[in-house]
Image (cartoon, grey):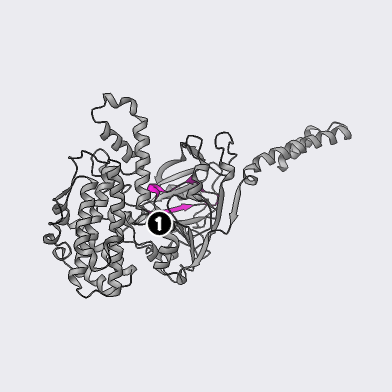
Amino acid sequence: MQRTSKNFLVMFGSVGDNQRSSSLLKYSLILFLSVSRSLLPWFGMNIKKGEIEKVNWKNLSYSEFVERFMQKNQPLLLNGFSEHHNWRASVDWVTPLGHPNFQFFSTNFGNSKVQVADCDTREFTDQKREEMLVLEFIGRCLQDVEGSAVQCSSNHSVPYLKDWHFVKEYPEYVAYKTPMFFCDDWLNLYLDNYRMHTDSDTYQENNEICCSDYRFVYMGVKGSWTPLHADVFRSYSWSANVCGKKRWLFLDPSQHHLVFDRNMKNCVYNIFDEVSDSKFPGFKKAIWLECMQEAGEIIFVPSGWYHQVHNLEDTISINHNWFNAYNLSWVWNLLLRDYNEAKEYIEDIKDVCEDFEGLCQRNLAANTGMNFYDFFTFISRFTLANIVLLCYINGRHGNITQISSRIAQHLLMNLGSIRKVASEMKDRHALKGNQDRAVDIIETLEDPRFCKLCMDIGRTYAMIHEESHLSFDFESASAGEIADLTILKAYTSSEFYTPEDLVEFIDNAVAEHGDCYINSSVI
């Protein structure tokens, strides 16, 4: 600004005072209009500050979190967490002054390969990404080796390390513990035991880490940011600031159409750009909820909430994507929408394609992260796991306590959610005529991975509902005790081919065991 004004005065230095004054006035007007145009997106936006509810974690029980935020799909800022939870990450990853300890990462994790976004370069609907070593990333962010972050050197744009599968890569280094509110995480519990893709066409052996879980570490300098988006699978997410400060802008799902074009195909990339009224006619009507997240605070992002995030300081955060019974329908609805789009996109080759449906499913898996077959296998295994646990509690504890009854109701609620989605799949004729890919019940029950999944879910619910003796039971029980084949074999045929098979299986199992805890109308 100062340099421009100086050049202007030099350029007009030889003219008379009146002419110079007139020219200066014109220049000032041009400059004002130019600046005004750059600020129009800010002035045209409706941003409500402080609208995200902020709660101290000590004043919130798990059942309250479910009722007020998870069920109602409302965002939340949790504070006071870091004061009572001694995460290793809060010590090792942060300097005494509260900045990212980049030197620690260079020394201990420098050879890890990570994805780094160039915050100044757009590529399709996201920022351009490049794979590099952690050591290289830190080299772009530091001008010295003292371990404190500084501005990026002038020959590089703003880098942002994203989606680092840190937990999978360093399982022995326990950087943090997932907060209790977010432990009912079907997605990552499943991926700890199974791969999402069973089709060789959609799974690559050499990409094991990248497909393995949805637990991430993010690391960015001041000025790094993430464009407007809704999370993968329309999952929930939680994001904890280990250090640094973020600015979040949220949009309620009921308004998501306002940030899309007339055809609902393209979304606004950056809400602070000058957004075209003709291309995005509803954008200025959107009401944005703003939230400032400090170090040690955790954001809960509900399903389908579009959000844009800016790092106001050098920041390290931990982020999980996850879903469970409360937002399972969001996952199915996204899959159905993306399937229809994938099918429409290649409709013109349908008559000449030998396996058109298979091609649609492969494209769906590539674009969305799973397809109908993956999802059906996922909910089938979770159905079996919930019924196995229900049978186990019933057989192990004849005199049901009130607390273990809460666990049973949780399991039944899970089955109700799965049944609802399976019924919707049946109504949509998803997997109609499927005879090639079935979930074998007996084979699943005898699989050690399935028994581990059951024990992981059981321990999680024992912890959530504060029933320590059941947690011990799940630790000490044998695979045979957990998965009693004699009970489960009688419910239906030995395989699930279609959603209709799954619905029938759930109905039979609940009729046998559900009434011990709650009227089966919960389903």
Residue 450, magenta (yes or no):
no
Which region shows up in magenta? Answer: 215-234
Q: Residue at x 65, y 43 (%)?
A: 39
Task: Work out whether 147 lies above or below 23.
Answer: below
Tag 1: residue type? Thr
User: Horizontally, is 200 left or right of 247 in the view?
Assistant: left
Position of the N terminus by quadrant: top right
Position of the C terminus by quadrant: bottom left
Q: How many marks?
A: 1
Where does the image place residue 335, in percent across and percent down from the top left? Answer: 35, 43
Residue 219, magenta (yes or no):
yes
User: Horizontally, is 461 left or right of 268 in the view?
Assistant: left
Asked if residue 138 can be seen in this view, the reply is: yes
**Quadrant of the image occupied by residue 24:** top right
Where does the image place residue 101, in percent across and percent down from the top left? Answer: 47, 59
**Residue that numbered label 1 is attached to:** 107
Task: Work out whether 158 lies above or below 521.
Answer: above
53 or 498, which lies in front? 498
